[in-house]
Amino acid sequence: MSTTSTDVTPRTLATGKTLGESGVRRDLRPPTPATGKAQAVRGKSARGKGVKAGPRVGAHTPVTWVKKGGLTTLVFALPVIVIFGVFSWYPIVRSIIMAFQETNLVTAKWVGLDNFRWVLTDPDLPRACLNTAYFLGLALLIGFPVPLIGAILMSEVKRLKGVYTVLAYLPVVIPPVVSVLLWKFFYDARSEGVFNALLGYIGLGPYPWLNDKFWAMPSLVLEATWAGAGATVIIYLAALIAVPTNLYEAAELDGAGIWKKLWHVTLPHLRGVLFITFILQIIATAQVFLEPYLFTGGGPNKATLTILLMIYNYAFGASLGSDYGSATALSVMLAIVLAIFSLIYFRLTKSWSQS
Amino acid sequence: MTKKREPSDLATPFNRGLISDFERRKPGVKISVSVVNVLLFLFLMLACLGPMYLLLKSAITPTQDTLRSPLSFFPNGAAWDNLSEAWNHVQISRYFLNTIILAAGSWFFQLLVATTGGYVLSVLKPKYAPILNALVVCTLFVPSVVLLVPLYLTVLHPPIIGTSLLNTVWSVWLPAGASAFNVVLVTRFFDSLPREVFEAARVDGAGPFALFWRMILPMSKPILGVVSVFAFIAAWKDFLWPMLVLKDPKVQPLSVRLPAIQGQTDLGVFLAALAISTVVPVVFFLVFQKFFLSGAGMSGAVKG
């Protein structure tokens, strides 16, 4: 056995180019289970002699590759490669190709920028963009202060804090489809509808909610905020916990009251996370689909038509449909915009989590 | 910075925040803090539990009562029939089972890809690991929207196998596995595991499979818990993708089926169906709170 081990040693090292890491980690994988024990010994001797072995010696053949465990590693890598390959990398490449093609699934022909031209001149596009921006504006108006104030108040709760947290997070775990359908029932436009009856107690309404051009979008945003605020509250709570307590103590020594501490210590510490949730909100809003699709179908009179709804209609809609080229062209344009925001987001979270 | 407190501390007993113990003892502060706490509690009850309560109540109320006065307590008695009607006649039971099958399969593939991928990228580290890692991380920047159409066409005409995956569970299970977020999360966790233990196991003759199965997976329970909870919930919530690829009502999950049956179902029965669909995720949440909340806190730092 010892002879084989010395025989293999140089080759083992030859492929392990960067010794610093691989010296230890590469050896972790003796190849076939049958020779597992022997390989473990080999691996050890390989490391022992590693320092002296120096530059590349010996050939790099498939046999040595298998013996060193390359095959086993590949078996472990297979799920990632296959699943990502077929269901992520391939579709990504394909979407870029399809954006420049006209396809009916059987044949495809190159049409250059025609798809983009078609989408950009679609009279619905400006409306969908404006609607999406309007959704975002409302979502920030309602969805920004509520979780922030809620989280700050909750972080000062001493007893039963868990109950508060669970209550706040509860709407997030309700399936979104159920939330939307339930709220659709609440938005019943008759004066006996749930919200209209509630508002009727204080002499307001009845409001037409989803049936009206003006009220439709705020109704959508209100539901979306309700369904999503809990997750934001948890993010803020985690950030609030991370505020160093000695800063509060220092501020108190300087005579700062509660409001002063809130303004000069707490809020500045939340700046990073507030910006992150802001970016997340933009990314999520640009892809909003469920609410307009289930509540209003884009109506009334296209008042809630969003970009994603347009993509859906191009590709799968009843009246248009099967215009995969235009759908992918619009998707690609949207993706480029969103990728910029994701990039900002990842840069931020990276520097943020390292600090 | 002083000691960094973790998101998991959310559940642990209070250690000071904005308001100091000294301030809390002042009568003015004491009263206003209590008042704010009570108001906050009432608000949360009303806003978060209120709609849930109304759903459960309406689920067992006769339709006519719900239509006439949705806010009142059972004016004409409770209609428990709604529940059994929804479960049996509207076949919620079948869609319920479909949802569980879809969620379980998605969970399995997400965990399979994330753990084996993390093992390759963090522990085995072959030469191509950096390339593989870069390719996986790249997909984090691609919003799911872009994939909608090409992914649909891929499922329609998958490479190699040739037959369409439409209307089969595979069309939901397999794409669910391609979650870069999971792979990154698990890889990072594996990176934090002590290398000496692997080394010791290797010296004892453990092969890569044994190392993976008997050492790494048992050590990774916390992160696997988080990934599992999110995988299951995401599968339960998913709507657009299953609606596109599962056209056959026989295999559709609740999320797809509920909007479809709305038109032809009696309101009371429909609300009962909604209530049934909500029970599982809510119970799941109450049982696995810790994973949910630590995972949600984590998303502030990493999620894509």
Image (tube, coloured by chain):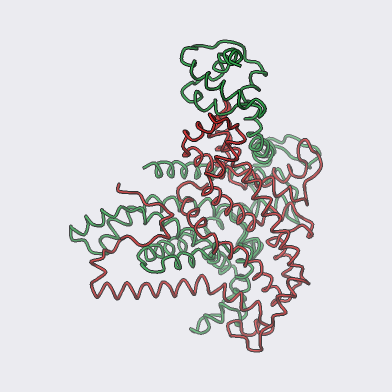
Q: Which residue is at 76% across, 63% downward?
A: B94
Asked if residue B118 is positioned above or below residue A306 in the image, the reply reads above
Residue A84's x, y, as percent? 64, 38
Residue A1's x, y, as percent? 61, 16
Question: Residue B156 sits in which quadrant?
Answer: top right
Residue A351's x, y, as percent? 40, 41
Image position of A267 (left or right of B108)? left
Residue placed most toward the observer, B206 or A101: B206
Asked if residue B230 is positioned above or below residue A38 in the image, the reply reads below
Q: Colour of chain A?
A: green
Image position of A263 (left or right of A226)? left
Q: Colour of chain B?
A: red
Q: Is residue A303 in sight in this rendering?
A: no
Q: Is residue B288 in sight in this rendering?
A: yes
Residue placed most toward the observer, A164 or A27: A27
Q: Which residue is at 37% across, 56% downward?
A: A241
Image position of A143 (left or right of A258)? right
Q: Which residue is at 24% across, 67% downward?
A: B23
Question: Residue B268 sits in which quadrant?
Answer: bottom right
Residue A7's x, y, as percent? 59, 12
Asked if residue B128 is positioned above or below residue A318 in the image, the reply reads above
Asked if residue A27 is positioned above or below residue B38 in the image, the reply reads above
Image position of A276 (left or right of B255)? left
